[in-house]
Amino acid sequence: MSIAIITGSAGLIGSEASRFFAQQGLEIVGIDNDMRSVFFGEEASTTWNRKRLEESLKNQYTHLSIDIRDQEAIPNLFKKYGSAISLIIHTAAQPSHDWAARDPHMDFTVNANGTLNLLESARQYCLDAPFIFTSTNKVYGDTPNHLPLIEQETRWEIDPNHTYVGGIREDMSIDNTTHSLFGASKVAADVLVQEYGRYFGMKTACFRGGCLTGPNHSGTQLHGFLAYLMKCAATGKPYTIFGYKGKQVRDNIHSADLINAFYEFFKAPRVAEVYNTGGGRYSNCSMFEAVQICQEITGREFKPEYSETNRIGDHIWWISDNGKFEQHFPNWKMQYNVPKILQEIYEFNRERWAKEVE
């Protein structure tokens, strides 16, 4: 019996990982106590996705509604399965800038202390199992906003002569920058994952994602950019764009493409690696461009509200350079760009959303 422990298993990345690695023959132990509904309200609950997961994977999936901060339950779980654990994928988190400022203690303990609890349990009971952590590009704070950016008709773009024209690499500094409290708690977790790799020889990887998305995302106003945008476009719910003239750029990576990256690392793990992982130049858009695509897909007029005030630490332009990961794992290729992602989100959810149409 080979076990994969997946935290946040009912969320976007966790559920995709659960299905994928179950198909590879692993038994899945999913940890998810639906904290997303605590953070963002009932509309963001992942219960619907957990039920789908249990129905589709049946006995191959064991769900545990425990808190990753629990310093008794988590070590006991790792002790129970011990050397049978062949993979840990840690996706559980408090994921919002805005929410972190409301309750910094909760944000930090979930993101940093919870990660520490998992790392130490893995070190004690399954030292050789690869430990994959979904970090974030917010570890770079607002440093990307100091890049030489040029305003275009529908987006901001970087100076074509700049070294990051192909995307931002891992050599960008994480110091002397405004991270937001969320970014700070994720920095703590990110560095812990690296240090457990270096100190103890654990096969750890921090995947610093941009916008992670897909049809299983329980998007909400404070988190889940593309999924919530499409939901609002399809249902007529109001949507607010914050600052930067609506031309801020995000790269977007589909959950399936990210899980395939995890699989490549699982097959040939390395120690204490850090990878910027996003849609890159293959899959990116500005807010303005995303709104236009949503209108085309839904056939509905969609005019978001606009606020001049941008979110603290928010990026004006972010496109990842996936080059380091592609060099280490040349078989990995992305399959989804932004229009394809939005079309899939719409097709997958429109019956469920039809009940909410205004």
Image (cartoon, rainbow, N blue to C red):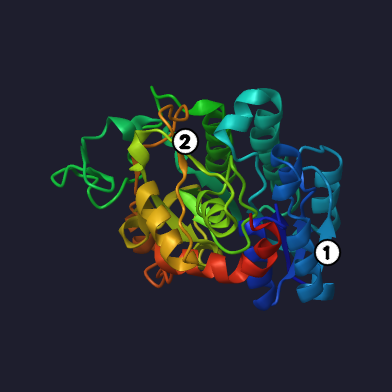
Quarter of the picture holding the N terminus:
bottom right
Element class at badge 1:
strand
Residue at left 41%, top 35%? Answer: 140
The label shown at residue 62 is 1
Q: Tag on residue 139?
A: 2
Decide: is 12 above or below 263.
above
Asked whether residue 121 appears in the rendered view, the answer is: no
Quadrant including the C terminus: bottom right
Query: Mark 2 and mark 1 in contact (Cβ < 8 Å)?
Result: no
- Position in image of residue 197 (x %, y %): 55, 45
- Residue reaching furthest top? 176
Q: Give, as a three-letter code, the residue at label 1.
A: Thr
Instruction: Tell me where residue 151 appears, x and y as whole percent.
Output: 22, 40
- Horizontally, residue 291 falls left or right of residue 21, namely left
Asked if residue 142 is positioned above or below residue 25 in the image, the reply reads above
Please say if 250 is above or below 94.
below
Q: How many marks?
A: 2
The image's mark for residue 306 is none
Q: Earlier in the sequence, mark 1 or mark 2?
A: 1
Q: Residues within 10 Å of mark 1 (few under 14, many from 20)?
A: some
Residue positioned 49% across, 56% down in the render: 270
Q: Residue at x 72, y 57 (%)?
A: 10
Mark 2 residue crowding within 10 angstroms, few (<14) / some (14–19) / many (20+): many
Considering depth in this image, is 205 or 138 the residue closer to the camera? 138
Against 318, residue 104 (above or below) is above
Left or right of residue 303, residue 112 in this image:
right
Cα–Cα gap, marks 1 and 2: 32 Å
- x and y percentages locating residue 330 in the rendered image: 37, 69
Residue 97 at least partly seen: yes
For this rendering, which residue is in front, 287 or 22? 287
Q: Amino acid at mark 2?
A: Val
